[in-house]
Image (cartoon, grey):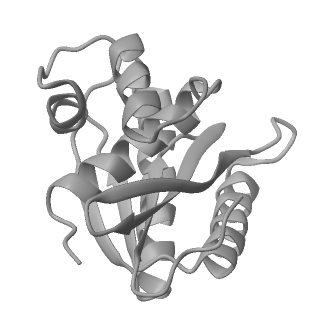
């Protein structure tokens, strides 16, 4: 999308997942936030578990190298309905956190409750409300289509507006 300005802070927001990991790169310049790049890492179902985790690591390394963030903001695993899925997402989070640290990024973690509170002002906000606020805060023409990517942008916004200071 765009190239960051000198002196700006670059934040990589991550919505961890096993099949789909959303990511968004924001530039924070004073109090201004700008979406530089975003997307999703999607591992193919035909890969075995370890290969999917390795693919996640490789793609995340590529994203970090290309976008040069200083901070990685990651959504915490808050609750789960399916233990098998939760374990796989937890393992993906481990790969994500390790990749951030290996690239000398400052890693910050936020719960879904903190993210909703930061964007909407209400910890029990609906997903659509959060997505609408992402659109408004980043001054986008339309909502980010993929939920995982919109969630990653919300994590980055939360970081930019709370603990991540220039």
Question: Quadrant of residue 134 in the image?
Answer: top left
Q: Is residue 151 above or below residue 109?
A: above
Q: Identify the residue at horizontal 66%, vertical 81% (top origin).
A: 65
**Position of residue 119 in the picture relative to residue 74 (left or right):** left
Q: Identify the residue at horizontal 64%, vertical 57% (top origin).
A: 53
The percent position of residue 158, horizontal first and vertical second, equals 26, 47
Along the line of sight, the residue nearer the viewer: 72 or 119: 119
Q: Identify the residue at horizontal 41%, vertical 67% (top origin).
A: 97
Q: Is residue 30 above or below residue 39?
A: below
Q: Quadrant of the C terminus?
A: bottom left
Q: Quadrant of the N terminus?
A: bottom right
View extreme (right): residue: 46
Q: Is residue 135 above or below residue 70?
A: above
Q: Identify the residue at horizontal 56%, vertical 80% (top origin).
A: 68
**Position of residue 61 in the picture relative to residue 27 (left or right):** right
**Position of residue 7 in the picture relative to residue 109 (left or right):** right
The percent position of residue 40, horizontal first and vertical second, equals 67, 44
Q: How many marks?
A: 0
The percent position of residue 104, horizontal first and vertical second, equals 41, 88
Along the line of sight, the residue nearer the viewer: 86 or 61: 61
Along the line of sight, the residue nearer the viewer: 128 or 132: 132
The percent position of residue 81, horizontal first and vertical second, equals 36, 16
**Position of residue 145 in the picture relative to residue 94 (left or right):** right
């Amino acid at each position: 999308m765009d190239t960051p300005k000198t002196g700006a802070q670059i934040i990589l927001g991550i919505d961890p997942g096993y099949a789909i990991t959303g990511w968004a790169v924001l530039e924070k310049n004073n109090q201004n936030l700008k979406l530089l790049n975003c997307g999703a890492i999607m591992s193919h179902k035909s890969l075995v578990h370890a290969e999917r985790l390795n693919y996640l690591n490789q793609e995340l390394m590529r994203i970090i190298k290309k976008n040069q963030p200083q901070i990685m903001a990651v959504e915490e695993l808050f609750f789960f309905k399916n233990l098998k899925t939760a374990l796989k997402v937890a393992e993906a989070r481990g790969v994500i956190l390790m990749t951030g640290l290996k690239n000398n990024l400052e890693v910050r973690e936020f719960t879904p409750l903190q993210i909703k509170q930061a964007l909407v002002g209400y910890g029990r906000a609906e997903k659509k409300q959060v997505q609408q606020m992402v659109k408004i805060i980043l001054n986008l023409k339309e909502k980010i289509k993929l939920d995982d990517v919109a969630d990653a942008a919300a994590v980055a916004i939360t970081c930019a507006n709370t603990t991540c200071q220039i």
